[in-house]
Image: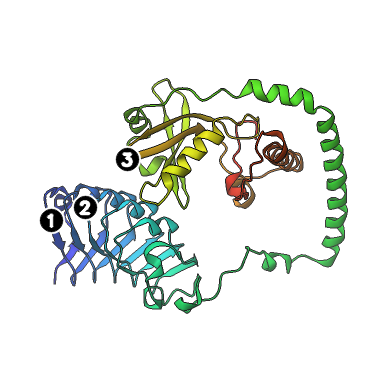
Amino acid sequence: MLNGTIPSSLWGLKDVITLNMSLNSLSGILPQEISNLGAAIYIDLSMNKLSGSIPITIGELQELGFLSLANNKLEGSIPVSIGHMINLAALDLSQNNLSGSIPKFLEALQHLEYFNVSFNTLSGEIPSGGSFMNFTMDSFEGNAALCGHPRFHVRICPAASSHKSKWKRVKPASFIAFGFVAFISIASLGLIIFIRYKRKDETSEEVDEEIPIMSERIPYYELLQATDQFSERNLLGTGSSCSVYKGILSSGKVVAAKVFNMRLEGISMRFSVECEILGDIRHRCLTSVISCCSNDEFRALVLEYMPNGSLEKWLHSDNHCLNFTERLNIMIDVASALEYLHHGYSTPIVHSDLRPSNVLLDEAM
């Protein structure tokens, strides 16, 4: 029958192994200091009145095997950092007000045997790899906007996102205008590509001079310091096999560190292949590899940092906007990079995952 907020002094118990405060009426938020419970292997705060978001620092609880925050009033998204909790065997976030998608990075949790996010307001695709192959519909029920495999009793995800609802609001006359603009755009694109093709020899000489050859390897501890120990605030994004962090080297150079998930099968071979291929390609529209960092338990590529983020951000964010010329130039640059990979390199290379989130923009867009 405990009520009120959890005392801040509790988060200083760095040697506590088990923390069970379930079935009370505790309120307030979970603070960032929850990461101080580094020795804990069992935390149960379910059946309370906790509110706010789940702190991203919870991912620093590397020893934790059981975590339950079920039956509270938590909001916001599921932190991607939970994917770093390598010993997690049971995770219960059910019956809250959580929104957003289920991080695909959770597929990497090899020991995860119990997972429950039922009765929230989650949306998007349910991950299908890793431990998610063993979960049932009970783990996801009560989230009407989720999609995925039919065995989860949710709708099947569309092959590609559509914007039909937006198009329904467009008047028929707008299509005529759109067709005219499209014709002008295609004509302009053809003209610019023709001009660039005529300058191909001049451009290729410029390309090789601008991108430096990969230098010697960067020590692990320098990369650790550059990214503030790969902290969540420096996380630029995650993929199925890696995470990318922003870092500042001792020289002051800003870089992007692509850290491979060593728990995945065949990842060392993939790292070696990427080092070999990406270290040799030279083109002004392909992100250059500055260096690499590797030891028995760690693999990372150090890449050129792109300060303007991804094309996806500029296309789908209310805070960013691209004019016609910028869009056209980006399309031409992407086409130029693909033409080089297919025809301008000694061995043809296929990108295989070309989408707006993988098109990155530098200062000059």
Residue at mark 2: 63
**Which of the two marks, 2 or 1, is nearer to us in this view?**
2
Q: Give me the disc on residue 275.
A: none
Q: Residue at x 32, y 53 (%)?
A: 55
Q: Position of residue 28 (x, y in %)?
A: 26, 60
- Within the image, what quadrant is residue 172 found in? bottom right
Q: Name the quadrant of the C terminus.
A: top right
Q: Mark 3 to mark 2: distance in Å?
A: 18 Å
Q: Position of residue 110 (x, y in %)?
A: 32, 58
For label 2, the SS is loop
Q: Give me the disc on residue 17.
A: 1
- The reply to whether the C-beta atoms of the residues labelled 2 and 1 are less than 8 Å apart is no
- The reply to whether the C-beta atoms of the residues labelled 3 and 2 are less than 8 Å apart is no
**Which of the two marks, 3 or 2, is nearer to us in this view?**
3
Q: Position of residue 239 (x, y in %)?
A: 48, 50
Q: Give me the disc on residue 297.
A: 3
Q: Position of residue 300 (x, y in %)?
A: 42, 37
Three-letter amino acid code at disc 2?
Glu
Using the image, determine if residue 46 lies above or below residue 87: below
Left or right, residue 141 beside residue 89:
right
Res. 319 visible in picture: no
Report the front residue among 88 and 47. Answer: 88
